[in-house]
Image: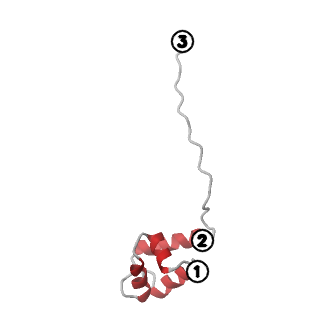
Amino acid sequence: MQTMTPAQFKRSRERLQLSLPQLAQALGVEHPTVWRWEAGQVAISKTVELAVKYLLALHDGYIPQNEPKPKRLRRTRERPSGA
């Protein structure tokens, strides 16, 4: 399976409306790394591809961003019947 091409990577960043430094921050890398991916100087790993696709899914509304967290269940102790 082929990973994301540099052109696809750049189009994804543009679709997300992020600058190089903004996407770098979102991915936890330095912005020259993002530039190298877009320029085709460094291969885009499958992990990076999946992270970008996740950001696109968030951006496009396929994954709710502010979904309420489920309530935490409280553990109750059983009390002895004679107490």
Residue 33 percent coordinates (x, y) = 39, 79
Label 2 residue SS: helix
As drawn, 64 above or below 2: above
In primary-sequence order, the first of circles 1 and 2 is: 1
- Which quadrant: the C terminus? top right
Residue denoted by label 3:
83
Disc 3 versus disc 1: nearer the observer:
1
The amino acid on which the numbered mark 2 sits, given as a three-letter code, is His
As drawn, 50 above or below 35: above
Label 1 residue SS: helix
Disc 3 versus disc 2: nearer the observer:
2
The amino acid on which the numbered mark 1 sits, given as a three-letter code, is Arg
Residue denoted by label 1:
15
| In contact (CB < 8 Å): disc 1 and disc 2 | yes
| Residue 17 occupies quadrant | bottom right
Residue 6 percent coordinates (x, y) = 45, 86
